Structures are given as structure tokens and as C-alpha cells.
Amino acid sequence: MQHHSITFRKTGYFSQLICDYLDEKPQLAPFYNRFPKFGNFKNQILEKEKSFSAESREVLVSALKNQYQSVEASEKTLQNIENLKFSNTFTITTGHQLNLFTGPLYFLYKIVSAINLSNELKKAHPDFNFVPVYWMATEDHDFEEINYFNFKGKKIHWNKNASGAVGELSTEGLEAVFNLFSQDLGPSKNAEFLKRLFSESYLKHDNLTDATRYLANELFKDYGLVIVDGNDADLKKQFVPFMEQELLEQTSFKQVTETNVQINQLPENYKIQVNPREINLFYLTENLRERIVLDSDSYRDGVYKVLNTDLSWSKSEMLKHLNEVPERFSPNVIMRPLYQEVILPNLCYIGGGGELAYWFQLKSFFEKVNVPFPMLLLRNSVLIQSENQLKKLQKLDVSSEDIFLKRDSFINKKVREISNIDIDFSIQKEHLKQQFEALFQLAKQTDKSFLGAVSAQETKQLKGLEHLEKRLLKAQRRKLSDEVSRMTDIQNELFPNKSLQERNTNFSEFYLEYGERLIPNLIESLDPLKGEFSILTL
């Protein structure tokens, strides 16, 4: 196994905002708390320790034990859950949608980042415990984003009419997906594992939450991963004061809007990732997840409505309803990060570039509601290549930086490098003309009747040079075409659909090849705080 890396900026696939953050550009300092370096974690621990109560820990542990009742968790995971009772235990959290069979590869990289950072922090701070957490986005409602995964250039798709929170969706209909996927996997030992994993996850669990919990636990239980479902009545009771404030004062809207203005005023023209609503909560029941709004016709009276329904409440009725059934209230993209930080003793959130971009919009909101803002870490990003692919790249003299270039830039750069033969006979033609000029002078001096013969010979030889030039050019183009074709073929393999491998390919393709050593190799190779894009040769 070989491992090297390049900067995120040099990949060309990450925004200026993220690259500037990794470079710790001072203009971004107001939008985050502490940069994720080992030396900064002690102060983050002290800050979180003061704000997270023993009562909150008891509620969290009780809720997790209920969620794990039907899960065969490892001793390490169970111990991590128990440790969350103690004031010296903190979490390192990542989150992800309930993508079918994990979706793109970066699902793995997020969790590996959380596991590795937890392990590294334990070495640096042995008196504390650090628990890697995967927060399941069970309350999301965009089924079209999660109902497929890519396998060897084919989209494995789950066709289903869906509404409401995706975590509550029935797994009915996934047997047909399993049968289709099984045909593509083949009969190998690794294929049989993948078949069992899919079957046990989706065909033996009734809803997508339970199926995803089983799947993530099977892949990562040996590393003590704790999986959290935020769609939990007991956990949401902890969040009721913040939801009350959101309903009554629209705090997040005011603070995030103000932050967005500040970001827009920066000279770098960073893109705003999300725009807040006046109320950033959904109402959640079976097959329903719709926005809560203040009724425009009764705005001053404080009448709350659920969009696309007949549900409405007065202010007092709404607050009473919230306290009675908090599980029916669901935070959106603006409020969910706060919910996470209220119910977890969390130090650091690990996410992709788009996720961190919207977290940068939230710091003043956290300060306003007096909740510590977590450290923000860009997850590990990885390109996996085989030994054979590496050898091809080396033979073609394609560097790690070359392979990340966009297609046209890649081809143009390599053609210029390869074309070290300058096939241009202009100099030879000019030299030939000069020679014939001397012959013309000689013919004039001897017998002018030879001028026609000399001219014919000049034309013949010039045409001969032009013909040779064209043949050589054609041969060179053919030669370059072959090399360019080989280069673009391997780039297509490593960057499916002209995108990063990790954003497209499902882990099952690599599990077929590398089997049970795939995840241990990732755990062993990836440094969560290195801040560079990894290229692994397995």
C-alpha cells in the first residue's frame, strides 16, 4: 500500500472558501471557533465541559441504549455509550444521509475521519475519552437524493413513492433491488459478504433508520462507532427551549441573515450555502414533513401553520403542543447543527466542503443562544487506485497533480509535454529554395532552356518535403492520440463521470477487490488533521 497526497487547492475540486479555511486566512476567523489542531482541543474540551450537564449525559445514554436494543453492538461501542455518562467523555461527530447501501464512498471517509481523530485525541489526552459518532440524518425528506447508488457505471435504483422523513420509510420493495444488485456482484467470497450485508440490512429491517444503523454498525463496530438517531422524543425534550425561542423570536433567521451579510461583504465573493427561513423547523408526522410558518394573514396574532396542511395553532397552543410532543418538531439545515450540539458533548464536527460552508454561517447564532460552537474539520478525501493503474500512470508520465486536471486542460498539458518533436519543415523548405536559387543563377549563366527543368525539380522536391511533413505529422498525431487515449481512459476510471471518485463510486466496488482489508487500510492510512487530499494505492 502506497500513500501520498496533494493540497486540496491543487485538486481543483474544492471551493476557494474551503481552501482559504485550510490556509487559515484571517478573513474567515470570525466565522469559526478554533481551527482543528491538536493544540486547540484542550480549550475546546474545557469550554464544552462547562456547558454540558450531567443530566444531559444521562438522557443521552438512556436514549442510545434504547436505540441499540436490537443491535449487536461491539464491547467497544457499548463501553463508549457507557462512558458518555462521565464528564471526561466527549464526542467527535460526523453526519450523513441514509443513502442506499451508504451511497458514495465519502460516507466511509467521514466515519474513518471521526474514528481516527478520536483515537489520536485519546493518545494526546489520555485522561479523557473520545467517542466517534455517526449522526444519521433520519429526518431528511429528500428521497431522490438517497434512493440509489452507483456500481460499475450502473445506477442501482430504488423506485418508490415516498413522503415524510426518510428514516421512517418502509424497506418494502428493496428485495427487487437486492436481486438486481446480486446479479452484478458475481459469486466471489467478497461478493457473498456484500450480498449478506445488503440482505441483513434492508430485507430484515422494517425501516430505513434501522437498516442504516445495522449497516453502519456492521462496517464500523470494531472501532467503537456510536450511531445516533436524532429523531427521538427524549432527545428532543432537551431541545425544547431552543425550539421555543425559534418559534417566538426567530433567532436563527436574524443571526444567520446578519452573518450572510458579513460574508457577502468579503472581497473573495464566497458563496452563501444556505439561506434561513423565518422559522427553521418542520412539523413531522407519519408521511409528513412540512415547514412551520407564521400565518401571514394572522401574523400579529401569532398563528402558526404547517404548510400544505390544515394544521394551525395559536401561540399558546403551539408552545403547549411543542412541550407535549417535541418529537413532532424537526430542525432544518439551520437548526440541526444546534440540536446536535445541545444533545451531544461534542468537540468537533467533521463534514464535506459544502457542509462546513453552511456551518460558517452559524457561529453568531450559537453565540446568541449560548451554546459552544464546535471545531470544524474537513473530512478526509481519498482517491483509491490499484497497483496496475499506478504503473500505467507512471509509464505515461502522468503525475498525481496531472490526473486531477479537468479533461481539456489534462489533454492539452500532456500533448505539449509529449510533443518534443517539432514537425515543421519551414526551415528545410527555405533552405531548399535557397539551393534552387543558386541553380537558377547557374542555369541562366549556362543555358536558359534549363530554367524550366530546374523549376520543375524545385516544385517536385518542395512537394516531396510537404508530403513527408504531412506523413510525419499524421504519424505523430496518431502516436499522441494513442497516448492521450490511454491517459484519458485511466482518468475516466479514476474520475467516473468526470467527478471525484469519492462523490460517485460506492464502496462495494472496492470491497469486491480488497475485501475485509479495505476499511482497516483506510483507518491505517488516513490522517484526519493533515489537511490534504490522499491518494492511496491498494
Image (cartoon, helix red, strand yellow):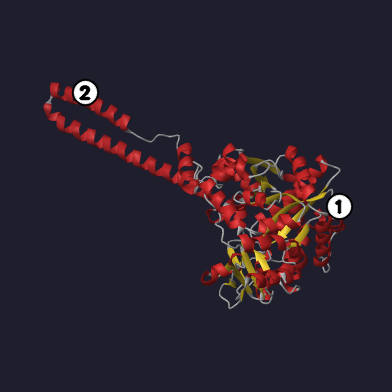
- Of pointers 2 and 1, the one earlier in the residue sequence: 1
Residue 431 can be seen, yes or no: yes
Q: Quadrant of the N terminus?
A: top right
In this rendering, position of residue 467 left or right of residue 330: left
- Badge 1 element: loop
In this rendering, position of residue 361 left or right of residue 461: right
Is 98 placed above or below 266 here? below
Is 290 placed above or below 500 here? below
Whole-angstrom CA distance, mark 2 to mark 1, is 100 Å
Question: What residue occupies the far left of the structure in this picture?
Answer: 448
User: What's the residue type where badge 2 is placed?
Assistant: Ala
Residue 208 x %, y %: 70, 70
User: What's the residue type where badge 1 is placed?
Assistant: Phe
> On the image, which quarter does residue 169 sit in?
bottom right
Q: How many residues crowd around disc 2 within 10 Å: few (fewer than 14), some, or many (20 or more)?
A: few
From the viewer's side, name the closer residue of 53 and 123: 53
Question: What residue occupies the far bottom of the structure in this picture?
Answer: 310
Question: What residue occupies the far front of the structure in this picture?
Answer: 301
Residue 248 x %, y %: 63, 63
> On the image, which quarter does residue 173 sit in?
bottom right
The residue carrying mark 1 is 86
Is 378 placed above or below 159 here? above
Q: Residue visible at 76% across and 48% down? A: 48
Residue 12 can be seen, yes or no: no
Residue 309 x %, y %: 58, 77
In this rendering, position of residue 6 left or right of residue 44: left
Q: Nearer the viewer, mark 2 or mark 1?
A: 1
Q: Residue visible at 47% across and 44% down? A: 409
The residue carrying mark 2 is 438
Is 453 placed above or below 502 here? above
